[in-house]
């Protein structure tokens, strides 16, 4: 699977760097070419000579090495690979990546690359659990960076916990998975996400509390399986994922227009929390208090139902249309009725009653309603729900 593949391996400065020498051997055994880049700190742990000997390649070390720039510049170096692997990815390297620093060869290559990046973090357990590292990790995942490990166990510093670099063979497996053509390669999937904002007047609007977390996770999971994703998002509080075509909208009507413009698609997932109503009339001026104590009466009109519109298209309907339902009681009965009413293929129903803690939380417990009945999934992280849904979509389109 790795025969003929080119891996750019950035070795960071941590005690786990010695395992990266074994990683080079394992990759070469499988037919890959490994071009190593050492950070200054890495040279405290492994030597350029041993790295170069194992890789049977020149080792790159310095951004300003003129010989390297004339032979192969840092831009070319970053693009010539099929995959960029950072092992060990230290807390410092992760911070640089998350913040876009480019002050040495490794960080510059990471900024310049147009290839996927896989990191194998390794650091002391407290450094791994530090809020800053976890923030940086979330940023990197959001940027589409793949992560292998870290593992739990005894650490060189004498402590115990997560922070040990994944073993070389585990990293090889992650590299092989990253190189595979996903089952959704060549498929176009449309995802709606986030809330919509419906203006009351030029300064006020009606909104809801959707963060866009579940829709974003689904778009990312579909991308990871090779899909080309069009991501139509309302004003969400979390950033859109990397590697998707993003269309930003404010209102339900704009979302419908964007969705229709993005078709055809093989599948469409409607995860947006679309406002059911908008103001009946456009209000070009700010509504003013007139001092009399009279309060304005807002008149509403119903918004178009985007999910129902697409589900009921006579021509050009995506082969698979997936909707969501947020319910507080009789989840299965309500969601089953909603599926029939809207005409979609699946409804992903979740119980959002306050005692579940799902609304605004990081976990979700869903039941997928299809023509075959109700399939109840155990409670799991929103990323896991997304991965499982993406895999189910891939299965249905296969
Ligand atoms: N939806 C849509 N366009 C709308 C309203 C909803 O595309 N104008 C989609 C949502 O993205 C979601 C599903 O329809 O996939 C939710 O349906 P909805 O009828 O809004 O159900 P709930 O939000 O669950 O609320 P209710 O129980 O009030 O029907």
Image (cartoon, grey):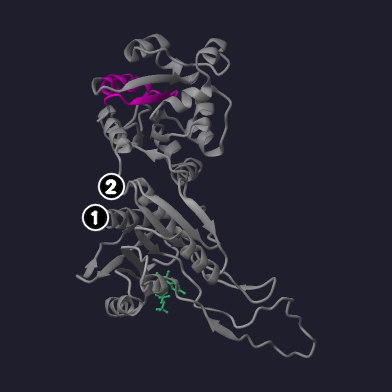
Separation (CA) of disc 2 from disc 1? 8 Å
Range of magenta residues: 3-28
Question: According to the image, label 1 marks what residue?
Answer: 395
* Residue contact between numbered discs 2 and 1, judged by CB atoms under 8 Å: yes
Q: Where is residue 337 in the image (x, y as percent from the top left)?
A: 30, 80
Outermost residue on the left side: it is 372
Mark 1 residue element: helix
In the foreground, 240 or 132 = 240
Question: According to the image, label 2 marks what residue?
Answer: 183
Establish if 223 lies above or below 87. Answer: below
In the foreground, 324 or 171 = 324
Who's the residue at 41% across and 17% down the image?
45
Who's the residue at 34% across and 30% down the image?
155
Quarter assignment of residue 176: top left
Q: Position of residue 129 (x, y in %)?
A: 43, 42
Q: Quadrant of ligand 1?
A: bottom left
């Amino acid at each position: 699977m790795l025969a003929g593949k080119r891996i750019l391996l950035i070795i960071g400065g941590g005690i786990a760097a010695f395992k990266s020498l074994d990683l080079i051997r394992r990759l070469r055994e499988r037919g890959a070419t490994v071009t190593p880049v050492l950070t200054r700190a890495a040279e405290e742990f492994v030597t350029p000579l041993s790295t170069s000997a194992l890789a049977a390649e020149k080792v790159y070390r310095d951004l300003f090495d003129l010989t390297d720039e004339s032979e192969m510049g840092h831009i070319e170096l970053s693009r010539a690979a099929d995959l960029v692997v950072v092992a060990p990815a230290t807390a410092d390297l992760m911070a640089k990546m998350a913040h876009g620093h480019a002050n040495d060869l490794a960080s510059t290559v990471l900024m310049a690359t147009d290839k996927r990046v896989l990191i194998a973090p390794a650091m002391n357990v407290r450094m791994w659990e530090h809020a800053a590292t976890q923030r940086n990790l979330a940023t990197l995942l959001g940027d589409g960076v793949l992560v292998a490990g870290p593992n739990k166990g005894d650490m060189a510093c004498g402590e115990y916990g997560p922070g040990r670099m994944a073993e070389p063979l585990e990293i090889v497996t992650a590299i092989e998975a990253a190189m595979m053509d996903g089952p959704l390669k060549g498929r176009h999937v449309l995802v709606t996400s986030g809330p919509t904002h419906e203006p009351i007047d030029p300064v006020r609007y009606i909104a809801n509390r959707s963060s866009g977390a579940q829709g974003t996770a689904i778009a990312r999971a579909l991308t990871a399986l090779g899909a080309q994703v069009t991501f139509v998002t309302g004003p969400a509080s979390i950033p859109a994922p990397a590697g998707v075509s993003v269309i930003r909208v404010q209102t339900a009507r704009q979302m419908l227009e964007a969705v229709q413009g993005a078709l055809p698609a093989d599948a469409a997932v409607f995860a947006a929390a679309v406002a059911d109503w908008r103001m009946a009339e456009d209000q070009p001026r700010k509504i003013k208090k007139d001092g009399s104590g009279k309060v304005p009466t807002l008149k509403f009109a119903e918004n178009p139902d985007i999910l129902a519109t697409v589900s009921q298209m006579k021509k050009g309907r995506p082969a698979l249309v997936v909707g969501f339902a947020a319910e507080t009681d009789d989840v299965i009965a309500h969601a089953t009725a909603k599926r029939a009413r809207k005409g979609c293929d699946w409804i992903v129903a979740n119980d959002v009653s306050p005692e579940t803690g799902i609304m605004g939380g990081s976990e979700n417990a869903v039941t997928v309603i299809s023509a075959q009945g109700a399939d109840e999934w155990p409670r799991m992280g929103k990323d896991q729900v997304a991965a499982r849904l993406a895999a189910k979509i891939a299965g249905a389109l296969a």
